[in-house]
């Protein structure tokens, strides 16, 4: 039984014996550093059932515990807060119970219902980039944390291998590729295809600009869009800009300025979308999409060839990052199942058809709006395939009771709609769907844009991290005994550890500004700092001649306060795992590990380990160091980070 649970029983017993009152719960908190004690009982909530001065009540309860409970060594009361000192024997007994547990903190599977975690889920029109890296690392880590908490987990992804974005790369390669292949260019397949996605965008912009200029110069009569003509939109934008300028000069009202900016953005976006969708190249891409859905032999053959190049490239990147999957799903397959259930939903009234033939779901009574699920020409949208994918997964894995979708926060609304539609279709498991929404990753230079080619390629990033680790490691000069292959492996371990930790230590909901140099610092809250501490512990173990893993005596033991603080930290690890699983937050694991490392380094600097006064102290401190190392290794394993034996 955990310390808090044991103490709760004793506090309730004390209150009943002293005041003949029953407590439902006991509120605990960590003891503030300026006071003596290991855990604090908050007395104020007791006033609901016990009348009196909280300080006096605290004194009486504390004295009862000290007189009647062996593990309570002492107490003090500060303004209604009962600070309890726990006998050192408790922590030694706790240590004896965990010190030989290789999987300390992890739970065996205790639920017959599995969880499926989706992550990565890339498009087959570009290589994985820094934004995908956060997705992959988050999803993989959450899956590992759920497993460590006692859940059966399946790791999966849905590959977006169809749609207009895929046709853009295909059309550009068809027109401008001259038969290039990964073999002929020496490029990974995903990089080659991504280059043609950028090439499509370049040509699209040229054509869209010509159309736009033709409209505003009057060469072609501007059509009516959204209730007014393009020319009127241009004039409206100019009027809004002038109005904004006047406000800045006079009142500088932030709310008014923001309101005008939103109106300008709306008009510009409408004009831009209109021009782009009426270019020859975009029209051709939509024609290619319709041919693909109709099963055109040549289009399908090209699609298979180029997607094959991309899949080969993805596998190399996943291996480099160190993640895996149990099952792959493909949008090109699941969207058909989505169409089937939309047809069923039309019959049952879940969906309705508009005059143009498009199919929608009316969610206005649920506080949302109408959502399209099939276009008027019968082609699928993202919602179509997401409906089909969810259903197919349950068909394939009947033991799945819930799913976690790792997708950026720009899709928050999409997943609200998806989960609601699945509930309306009558699927009971839909209540256990969770969107692991995360913030974007920015660079000091600004936001990344795939179609403009301004992204940080995942493979290049991994190599850059390894190169930076090499540079810093050489400056530290501690690798003389390593072979070149060992050095290379270590640089990659440090570089990847730095990247993963920097991303995972941040709450998933928060946006990240990624700085590679800062992430690989060997001091502070970084992956390399924690890896270095682990390696230091392994060095201590190698130098030690202690082989005894037997039970440490708790009789008459007196712990150094640094030893006790470490043991208190270790005791929290199983709860941290459970909390991280419940909150789907690797950040809780990352920052807990940093706290453990800080406490170990304080212990290392203040307490002699190998030079202890007695053999018993030396044995205990070596064993404590070993257990701290194992806990660091276990914590980092669920973050997908390796720990080196030497650094």
Image (tube, rainbow, N blue to C red):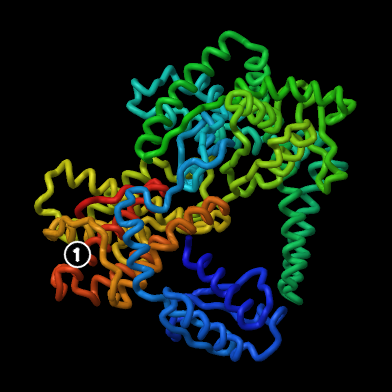
Nearer-the-camera pick, 623 or 130:
623
Q: Residue furthest right?
A: 355
Residue name at image x 41 percent, y 42 percent: 458
Nearer-the-camera pick, 264 or 113:
113
Q: Is residue 629 left or right of residue 404?
A: left
Q: Position of residue 360 (x, y in %)?
A: 82, 32
Q: Which residue is mark 1?
A: 619
In this rendering, the answer to whether 21 lies above or below 223 is below
In this rendering, the answer to whether 38 lies above or below 293 is below
Q: Is residue 513 visible?
A: no
Q: Position of residue 120 (x, y in %)?
A: 51, 38
Q: How many marks?
A: 1
Q: Position of residue 392 (x, y in %)?
A: 63, 25
Q: Position of residue 526 (x, y in %)?
A: 36, 61
Residue name at image x 71 percent, y 86 percent: 51
Label 1 crowd bin: few (<14), some (14–19), many (20+), radius 10 Å: many
Nearer-the-camera pick, 272 or 535:
535
Q: Image quadrant for the C terminus?
A: bottom left
Residue name at image x 56 percent, y 22 percent: 171
Residue name at image x 54 percent, y 72 percent: 10
Q: Secondary structure at mark 1?
A: helix
Place residue 614 in its image quadrant.
bottom left
Nearer-the-camera pick, 183 or 498:
498
Q: Is residue 413 visible?
A: yes
């Amino acid at each position: 039984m955990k310390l808090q649970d044991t103490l709760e029983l004793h506090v309730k017993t004390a209150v009943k014996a002293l005041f003949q009152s029953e407590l439902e719960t006991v509120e605990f908190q960590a003891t503030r550093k300026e006071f003596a004690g290991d855990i604090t009982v908050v007395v104020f909530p007791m006033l609901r059932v016990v009348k009196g001065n909280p300080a006096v009540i605290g004194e009486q309860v504390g004295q009862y515990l000290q007189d009647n409970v062996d593990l309570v060594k002492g107490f003090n009361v500060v303004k209604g807060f009962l600070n309890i000192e726990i006998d050192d024997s408790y922590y030694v007994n706790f240590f004896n119970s965990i010190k030989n547990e290789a999987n300390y903190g992890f739970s065996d599977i205790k639920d017959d219902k599995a969880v499926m975690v989706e992550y990565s889920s890339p498009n087959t029109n570009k290589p994985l980039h820094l934004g995908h890296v956060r997705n992959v690392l988050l999803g993989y880590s959450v899956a590992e944390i759920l497993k460590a908490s006692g859940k059966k987990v399946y790791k999966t992804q849905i590959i977006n291998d169809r749609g207009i974005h895929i046709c853009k790369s295909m059309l550009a390669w068809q027109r401008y590729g001259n038969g290039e292949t990964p073999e002929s260019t020496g490029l990974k397949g995903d990089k080659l295809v991504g280059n043609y996605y950028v090439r499509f965008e370049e040509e699209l912009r040229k054509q869209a600009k010509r159309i736009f200029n033709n409209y505003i110069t009057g060469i072609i009569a501007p059509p009516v869009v959204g209730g007014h003509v393009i020319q009127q939109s241009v004039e409206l934008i100019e009027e809004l800009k002038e109005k904004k300028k006047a406000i800045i000069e006079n009142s500088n009202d932030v709310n008014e300025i923001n309101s005008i900016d939103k109106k300008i953005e709306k008009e510009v976006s409408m004009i831009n979308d209109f021009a782009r969708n009426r270019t020859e190249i975009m029209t051709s891409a939509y024609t290619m999409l319709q041919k693909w859905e109709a099963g055109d032999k040549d289009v399908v053959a090209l699609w298979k060839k180029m997607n094959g190049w991309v899949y080969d490239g993805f596998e190399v990147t996943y291996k480099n990052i160190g993640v895996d999957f149990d099952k792959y799903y493909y949008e090109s397959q699941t969207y058909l199942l989505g169409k089937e259930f939309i047809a069923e939903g039309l019959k049952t009234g879940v969906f309705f058809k508009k005059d143009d033939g498009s199919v929608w779901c009316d969610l206005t009574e649920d506080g949302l709006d109408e959502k399209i699920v099939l276009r008027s020409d019968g082609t699928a949208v993202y919602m179509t395939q997401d409906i089909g994918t969810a259903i197919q997964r349950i068909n394939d894995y009947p033991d799945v009771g819930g799913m976690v979708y790792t997708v950026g926060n720009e899709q928050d609304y999409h997943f609200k709609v998806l989960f609601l539609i699945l509930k309306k279709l009558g699927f009971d498991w839909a209540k256990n769907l969770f969107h692991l929404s995360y913030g974007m990753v920015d660079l000091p230079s600004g936001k990344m844009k795939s179609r403009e080619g301004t992204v940080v390629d995942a493979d290049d990033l991994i190599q850059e991290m390894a190169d930076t680790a090499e540079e810093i490691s050489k400056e530290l000069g501690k690798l003389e005994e390593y072979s070149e292959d060992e050095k290379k492996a270590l640089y990659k371990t440090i570089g990847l550890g730095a990247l993963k930790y920097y991303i995972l230590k941040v709450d998933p909901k928060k946006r990240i500004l990624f700085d590679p140099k800062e992430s690989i610092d060997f001091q502070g809250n970084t992956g390399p700092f924690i890896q270095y501490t682990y390696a230091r512990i392994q060095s201590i173990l190698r130098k030690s001649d202690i082989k005894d893993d037997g039970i440490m005596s708790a009789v008459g033991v007196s712990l150094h306060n640094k030893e006790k603080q470490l043991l208190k930290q270790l005791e929290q690890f199983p709860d941290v795992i459970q909390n991280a699983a419940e909150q789907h937050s690797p950040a809780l694991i990352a920052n807990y590990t940093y706290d453990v490392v800080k406490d170990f380094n304080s212990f290392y600097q203040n307490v002699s380990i190998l030079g202890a006064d007695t053999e018993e102290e030396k044995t205990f401190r070596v064993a404590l160091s070993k257990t701290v190392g194992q806990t660091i290794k276990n914590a980092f394993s669920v973050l997908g980070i390796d720990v080196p034996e030497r650094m």
